[in-house]
Image (spheres, rainbow, N blue to C red):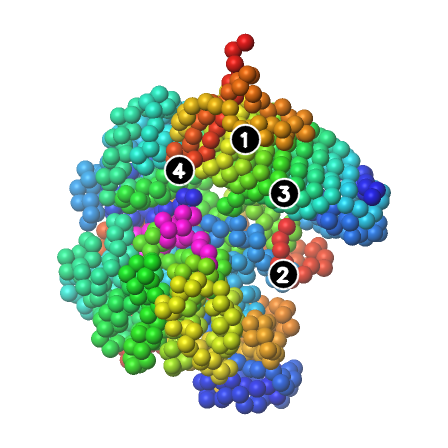
Amino acid sequence: MLRIIGGTVYDPANGINGQVKDLFIDGGKLVASAAEGRTIDATGMVIFPGGVDVHTHVAGGSINFARAMTPEDHRRTQAFIRSQTRRSGIGGMAPTTFATGYLYAGMGWTTVNEAAVPVLSARHTHEELADIPIVDKSCLVLMANNEIMLDLLEEGEYERAKQIVAWHIWAAKAYGVKAVNPGGVAAWKWGKNASQLTDPIEGYATLTPGSIVTHLARIVAELGIPHPLHLHCNNLGVPGNISTTLETVKHLDGARAHLAHLQYHAYGGDDWDTMKSEAAQLADYFNSHPNLTTDAGAVLFGDTVTISADGPWQHLLYKLTGRKWGNLDVENETGCGIVPYTYRPSNLVNAVQWATGLELLLLIDDPWRVFLSTDHPNGACFWRYPEIIQLLMSADFRKECMAPLPTAIKNRITLPEIDREYTLYEIATIISAGPARALGLHHKGNLGEGMDADIVIYNREDDIARMFGHPRYVIKGGEIVIEEGDIRETPDGREYLVKPFYEPDTEEFLRPRFEDRYCMSFENYPVEMERIERSQIQACASPDSSDSPQ
Amino acid sequence: MGGKVTCTLGEVKNRADFIVYWGGNPAECHPRHFTKYTLMQKSKFLPRGRKDRTVVMVDIRETKSVKAADIFLQVRPGKDFELMTILRAMVKDQEVSDEQIAETGLTREQLTDLIARMKGARFGVMFFGMGLSMTRGKHMNSAALLTLAAEMNAFTKFVAMPMRGHGNVTGADVIMRWQTGYPFGISFNRGYPRYNPGEFSTVDVLVRGDTDCAFIIGADPGATMPQPAIDHLAKIPTIVLDPHVTHTSRLARVHITTAPAGIAAPGTGYRMDEIPMPLRPALESPYPSDEEVVRRIKEAIAAKPDWMGQQPQMLLSQI
Amino acid sequence: MNPITFRLKQEPTVTLEAEVITPDRMLEMSRAEIAASTLYHGKRQRRLDEFFEIDGERSDHLILHGDLTRVRHLGRAMTRGSLTVQGDVGMHLGAQMKGGKIEVFGNASDWLGAEMLGGEILVHGAAGQQVGAAYRGSMAGMRGGLIVIDGAAGIEVGMRMRRGTIVIGGRVRDFAGLEMKGGTIVLQQGAEIRTGAWMRRGTIISLQPLQLMPTFAASGSFNPTFVAVYSNHLRQHGIDLPYRAEAGRYERFVGDRAIPGKGEILIWRENAA
């Protein structure tokens, strides 16, 4: 049992905005009262629900490929030293699994969603997730370039495609569905891309990226998956891609969707020389379409490694930078590209990207629909989130950071005209309550009774980045994991899954198609339930879900 | 500066119409490679199977695998790196003289033809074996092939992949990477992982005599390493976990017999393309698994006083 | 200022990591502090005075005696002063150093002066592999300073170096100047194979014939003035770099065309007597 008394609580899920309130914890949950146990005097301190990252890349084949490619970064970054209770690790651009848990928890994040998992290597992803301590985890399976599903959509077999998606979610032991560059990754297998939403995809007669978006969003909704379709639009990072993005969301036909790393999809201009931010236009559209949520995919200046299932974009980046390039195509499902990258304030394109991310966060007016992310590690590493919080909370600090940008930035961004400053309540919404709700994790990002006792306690400080980078206490599942900057406990987190309903004959339908294309036995393809450590199945909204087969 | 551009083996099966084996002998070393992935398979994109694929074998001698190839390029021993570097130049239309090409044992016509086929392929793949990675030049030979494949993507789709062997070496590589950031050649002596092949790789540590104890799982260095390394293993306390009696277990102070992984012990094996496969034991073994032995040793060590002394939790600057 | 003398009194049985022994650190330390500073013997922390007899304090001139083959990271990132080794010495000597001078009267090991930024390293014996090189994955090796080795050196000398000078008196093994981006390597006794492979820029001067990569092209012969300047500069280290037209000329080769790069390899041809 634990009591936290006298703290100033920001709990947007319950409309609590800076009220002094005592919190009581028992059995890992928040409760009405606790008679005994340690008492934390949080007088004068700020209390948030634990952070929730809706979109990050922390486990699996791609980030592990990035680790292999960046030993020079591992050497220059922070190292965690082992102790009798803690594993060693390396931070930096692509942190090791143990360090990932320590770094997230160290800044008060207690739930993370790994946003890109191929079924074929899902077993690997889960093995890595099991090695990320402290935080709770979930992951999204990549479907928008799954060739078995694409073939079915081309054949007009919508119902069958839906069964296949449900089967794959369960096979991957995933929590939801991610669509990356629909059709484009499949085309990349031939060194091509899919840049027009209404043009047929390379290798298909009629199927277009637009129709994949329409169908997948509907499938995810009909299966009752708690998190809507997690959508990485086509033409990521390309000047002028605002038109693609707007066309993509129109293809949703009003269905719910979460738009991943929107910053990378909000550009105007015709080429790199004329590229500008269209965040204002996109935010306008977004504000009037309540079916959408998004995460910013904000960029911070500095070194990082970009890693994306968007192979074509990564090849372009390699050609632009002349640095190392890794690429991994995954049969029938997806691919990924990896390129180390440095965002520089002196580079006009990078400066526009930096401003665009902040503009989206500042111009989308509902904090329940736009969340903090950097698309880690693409825009910046997740452990730099406190810097973004500072940029959002201080217009003066933003002005300071804009000073060194190239003069040509004028008329390409609207950031200088925005004077909005986030309140603590709004910050608590975009880093915790909002993403938890969008993920459908209702017991997260919420300090109400009965909810998970994931709590962050900050010292109130003028230096905002410091305040959010160094919480006084972090409590995960009722246990104090961080205290005064020290890692106290490293409990293992849970993994959230869903088990959507699919027709019992799906497997037999799938088997010959699988055996035709893949090169492993069908039995070895799905991840067995016993391979998931501390799993927790979340309910799907569909009434059928209770009598799922298996 | 190049990089690694690769794919899973199913991509090769489904799409590769142009396949190069360089310094490898799959017919004898990876006997299922031809039939499962590269030659015999038909697919939606390659409906005529073998007829839709071109196979090139590059090697210093005519191995058994050569019979399966459409084109055999016999490179002069020790000239692989030079040949790959010439190809990198020629695909970019850089001049290389006939005499310089002849040094590699091949002719301009052979190389011009090869490059035309590479650029004309829809999906090219290059596999390389120990004939490349373990001969003079070693990691630079691998780097040359990986870079050539990466650079070919300026013209068409191209990937490269090492033909790895020795059980689950890929699995060890994958797990070391997620736990430490590095694939092999790692030292933990400072309480956090440090990487430097040549300094911390097993064979170098043993040859220099930099270690006073050895713990060996799933490997038989006593059969493969140079004599000074083996001599050092015999001199220090060496502990071996292995289902079988091996060269190494014979020179070890302690040999703990364990259940064979994949046969009597479950787990995950990583294929050469890093795809994880479940290992489902078919038999029972009276012996414990490697994992259990290691866990029990670890528990016993944890009960002892820590040797680390006072250490900060985190270092901002490493040595 | 009197130097501090370190005399190895106990042979390490495994590697001994001694990054604390740099002029910068020792300048600030009393004798007691030096004695108590930490070395890593394998995984164990040991006091410096368990391994070394120490004479002197608070100096940025250090002299080490003994067989230091297993002692690594000496002079790491030093910026000033001097470090003299009487004997053989282990890996990473002077890695990332920025200034000052290191002199070895014996043999040095691998990664000598790796990623160094400035200063001088003189080795009167042989050196190991990756002299002045980039560590694995780094974009740049040596970025300034001078390394002079009287004896031979191993593979990958000056790998990815960007600036600075490396002079090797003895024969060098494969891949000297691998992926070089700038700076100068002087090979007094030539090298084995693959010299200058994949180089982008920079200069390799060899006083002996070289087996060149097939991707280098001959580009005339000449007596460049910059070699004369170099020659004058290196004379203070007892190095004789020929440049006079009366004595011979340099044949110039440009590559590596695989990149395609603009590096140059100059090979000295003496005039026929």
Nearer-N-terminus badge (4/3): 3
Viewer-side residue, A143 vs A383: A383
Nearer-N-terminus badge (3/1): 3
Q: Amino acid at mark 3?
A: Gly
Q: Amino acid at mark 4?
A: Ile
| Within-10-Å neighbours for mark 2: few <14, some 14–19, many 20+ | some
**C-alpha distance separating marks 1 and 4:** 25 Å
Labels 2 and 4 share a subunit: no
Labels 1 and 4 share a subunit: yes
Contact, CB < 8 Å: mark 3 with mark 2?
A: no
| Within-10-Å neighbours for mark 4: few <14, some 14–19, many 20+ | some
Q: Amino acid at mark 2?
A: Met
Residue bearing mark 2: B314
Can you say whether A383 is above or below C144 in the image? below
Please state which of the two labelled residues, at mark 2 or mark 4, is closer to the viewer: 4
Magenta stretch containing residue A325, yes or no?
Answer: yes
Q: In the rendering, at what x and y percent does residue C40 appear?
A: 71, 48
